[in-house]
Amino acid sequence: MGSEKGKLSLGAVSRRAFLAATSVGAALALTGCSSMSGESAMSMPKKLACYKKHFGTLPNGRKVDQFTLTNSRGMVVQMITYGARFQRIVMPDRKGNLGDVILGFDNLADYARSHAMDPYFGATIGRYANRINHGRFTIDGKTYHLPLNDGPCTLHGGPHAFDQQVWDAEPVTELGMPGIRFSLFSPNGENGFPGDLQVNATYVLTDDNTVKVHFRAVTNKPTVINLCNHACFNLLGPGTNAMGHELMINADYYTPVNHDFIPTGAMARVAGTALDFRKPMIVGSRLKHFPKGSKACFDLLPYGYDYNWCLRNQDENKLSLAAVLSEPTTGRYIRCSTTQPGIQVYTANFFNGDIEGIGGRYRRHGAITLETQHYPNSPNEPQFPSTLLRPDEMFYQRTDYQFGVHA
């Protein structure tokens, strides 16, 4: 796990000092009184800027803000403080037409509504992204128990985790580029996790259409941590089928799973399987039809992907290429680079058209995630890269999403 030993400790510094030490620059903001619509996002001025507006108010009275980042090339990134999540990412296609490329909602009520399966659209996930088997793990001889929210496991930090909380946020700049620094304090015992945890997630939009994501955290007790972003990408446009996208994953191995999507502990070769994306492949070309009503066993009959790939040449101290996702009709692509050891690719297998958002109804295979992270269930698999964070360390991970267009 990427960490910086001896840098900061929550026990030694206040939360304010932590935020000051991890600040990336001075604030730039314009304030307003209402959230920005999709139509407004399409017509934003082409300049480096950050705009802040009110997005909505939760039933408990908490106010949620919307931030809009723009650059000189016409790209627009909108985020909200509910879940520190992407709401829209607007970019051109090869003809210069602007369009949204992620799934999301245009109002707070739909984000806050209890869905049958929370899609986690665009959210910053924590404390632990992906699954922990049986909702338990052991640190220094003590076993901790978490609430189960996905069959026999704890998924994405459990119920009411980071994706359902209102983060503090402020505009920042990094080398002159506009960004947002989201901050959240997670108290000891929240969803069963040990230690007070102070987290910030910084999202910066550069002038070459790259979204840079920095995650930092400190704790006052040994704990486990695994942060990622859960953007659901569709480069053709939300509301359409994404199985015509082309995908390359820079990985020779993946972590096989059981019927409950828990890794078996092995790291298997992708060669000769439907998970071999070492060369660009059309995603839908690798799928087999899964029998209706049968229980999923992706190793035998994948009807969609929900796997962790073990990335090649990963170094926690520098970015390495993880994946390239492209869409031939529009020419749009994303190059994803990260310091994290794994990437979870999910193809919206459980969407069924019940959820309607920006762009229409979201049906099965209507999106693809590029969740850079540590492996699922790592706290219970000592052979996997460690997710343990101790008080004398700072958790730090970085992911870049570079957006572009093929001619």
Image: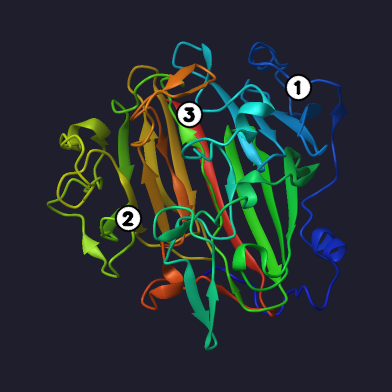
Q: Does 99 appear above or below 235?
A: above
Q: CA distance from mark 3 to mark 2?
A: 33 Å
Query: Who is closer to the viewer here, 175 or 55?
Result: 55
**1 or 2: tag closer to the N-terminus:** 1
Amino acid type for the residue under numbered disc 1: Ser
How far across and how far down the image is residue 397, in percent?
58, 59
Residue 175 in sight from this viewpoint: no
How far across and how far down the image is residue 361, in percent?
45, 19
**3 or 2: tag closer to the N-terminus:** 2
**What residue is drawn where x is 60% and y is 27%?**
88
Mark 1 neighbour class, 10 Å CA radius: few under 14, some 14 to 19, many 20 or more: many
- Label 1, on which residue? 35
Under circle 1, the secondary element is loop
**What residue is drawn where x is 38% and y is 40%?**
324
**Residue occupying the far bottom of the picture:** 141
Query: Which marked residue is nearer to the observer: mark 3 or mark 2?
Result: 2
Residue 186 in sight from this viewpoint: yes
**1 or 3: tag closer to the N-terminus:** 1
Confirm or deny contact between disc 1 and disc 2 (CB under 8 A): no
Amino acid type for the residue under numbered disc 2: Phe
Q: CA distance from mark 1 to mark 2?
A: 38 Å
Mark 2 neighbour class, 10 Å CA radius: few under 14, some 14 to 19, many 20 or more: many
Under circle 2, the secondary element is loop
Q: CA distance from mark 1 to mark 3?
A: 27 Å
Under circle 3, the secondary element is strand
- Label 3, on which residue? 404
How far across and how far down the image is residue 43, in percent?
68, 12
**What residue is drawn where x is 71% and y is 70%?**
188
- Label 2, on which residue? 261
Query: Which marked residue is nearer to the observer: mark 1 or mark 2?
Result: 2
123 with respect to 305 (left or right): right
